[in-house]
Amino acid sequence: MAPGVPALLLLLTGAGTPHRLLHEEAVAPVPWAVAESGRPTSATAPAPRFEPTETVESAVSEGNRFRIHFTRQGPNAVPLADADGSGVPDFVELVGRTYERVATFYAGLGFRLPPDDATTPGDNGGDGRFDVYLVDFALRADGAFRMETCLDGTTRCTGYMLQENDFTGYGYPSDQEAVEILASHEFFHAVQAAYRPDLGGIASEGTAVWATERFEPALDDLEGFSHSYLELPDRSLLTDPSGPGVGFSYGAGLFFQFVGERFGDALLLALLEESVRQPDVRWPLLLDTCLRRDFASSFDAAFAQFSAWNLGTGSRATPGFGYARGEGYAPLVTTASALPTSLASVRVAGASSRIFEVAGGASFVSASFEPEAGTDPAALYLLVAAVTDDAVLRVKQVGGQEPLRAQVAAEDATRVLVAVVDGRTQGLGRYGQLCIAATGQDADCAPVLPPPPDAGADAGTEDAGTVDAGTGDAGSADAGRPQEPIDDPRDPSGSDGGCQAAGGPLSGALIALLLGGGLRLRRRRLGADRPERMRSDD
């Protein structure tokens, strides 16, 4: 590793959530791209690669599945300590042991392991074992899977791994944690390739981040990437980002973490298996197929519940609501507004949500979303949540009606969050009018209504406005989640009338992000919501 290279790879947000370096370079070949320029022992291989003056050795892992390639001199040299006197550096043995653990774990979940590369044309590393090359990424990234060949057309593919040679300057707490994160993430790309390697960046990186969390929840990779999604929930999961925005694909690991916690490992396994049966179908449609066939659910229903879980991250993580480890995730970024408010043209893209925040304290807060005339309202949902700075109190979810209307008791809330959710698996953005009002405010478009006469004192208290809050056996020891906070439709009082447009100052705590060399305050601006009508969902 070249000395003196500045590296601040773990940045802190205002909530103390670490920001993680992308494992692969944003400009590097995507994980499923075929490597055509040779392995890193070749002078024609792209960087990182071994230098011609370096002597490259290899060692076989104890479980006999992996061959680890390394050098003892030059910029790609591994740490040379050999405490057990085996003749193989301890770092190399650590890599071999960790990859064996990872492979055994994934196989135990039912996933395919990559086929051997004995028949790979040209250099295959010396035998059919899976090859890991320890090379210097020089702080640009820290690992990559390179696909080489497919045994069955475009499926059952295999390749090799590149991994950072010493992690000097990377900020990981230990070599062991660094290797565990890299091995579990990058080897899951090899697992993906053993099925179908072209699922796209969102599914590829997102499920790899999930896989690391599933392998060892104490690793903070998902926590470090969570801000990349929770700062941009209005960005669609249907479009793969590129360039500087590629971190969103890693942040999408939060969606697959939700999938794993809510439905269990079996759904992630079914997704990859279905990708082989339908090799030309995009991953959201594949996931919808699996949910409808095997889990009595759908992509849009699951995405709406995912959006609800995201209301309870960071300091608002609430026992019995949402993620098992939500306190370690970044806080959700919202758009601040005053009460009452009316936005004539709010755009929401497929597989995304628009989230607004107003003051609590009123007896009730009501919201409505009415799609533009002629718009298909399918897979649109409205969530209204009463929250404090450190808890989600109750959530009301509605869908399948036009317009969407929901209200929540808010007297004990400091804030109310309103989310417009589009759970479609494809399609352009949709527009509609959003209105939010509190008890006693003139708001014809979002009237605060009394409960039905026969509702009783305990009406609507089953769960957070959803039929399944994640309480079933999801196929793993800690996959099922407790019930979400209950609805509380106490009898509201006050008048209703016309609705006025209003924008307000940013309420709640500002989220300070340490990016590059300075602080950046991210503030959403109301208005100018409507882009060109033919713009794609990006």
Image (cartoon, rainbow, N blue to C red):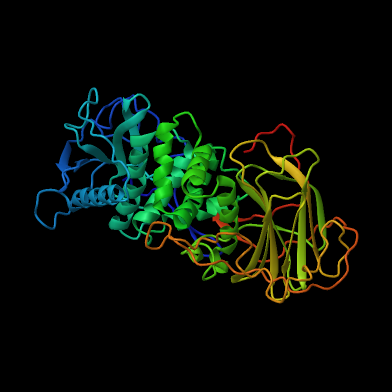
Q: Position of residue 301 (x, y in %)?
A: 59, 50
Q: Position of residue 449 (x, y in %)?
A: 81, 66
Q: Quadrant of residue 85?
A: bottom left
Q: Position of residue 141 (x, y in %)?
A: 40, 44
Q: Is residue 426 above or below residue 416?
A: above
Q: Which quarter shows the C terminus?
A: top right
Q: Which residue is drawn at the image coordinates 61% and 50% (left, top)?
A: 233
Q: Position of residue 54 (x, y in %)?
A: 20, 35
Q: Is residue 316 above or below residue 273?
A: below
Q: Is residue 170 visible?
A: no
Q: Which residue is drawn at the image coordinates 86% and 72% (left, top)?
A: 494
Q: Nearer the viewer, residue 408 or 419?
A: 408
Q: Is residue 458 above or below residue 221?
A: below
Q: Nearer the viewer, residue 106 or 178?
A: 106
Q: Nearer the viewer, residue 225 or 321?
A: 321
Q: Nearer the viewer, residue 224 or 397?
A: 397
Q: Which residue is drawn at the image coordinates 74% and 34% (left, top)?
A: 533
Q: Quadrant of residue 214?
A: bottom left
In screen coordinates, is 370 left or right of 37? right
In screen coordinates, is 109 left or right of 7? left
- Single out the residue that lies furthest toward the right: 498
In screen coordinates, is 115 left or right of 170? left
Q: Is residue 63 visible?
A: yes
Could you tell me how many numbered marks the image carries? 0
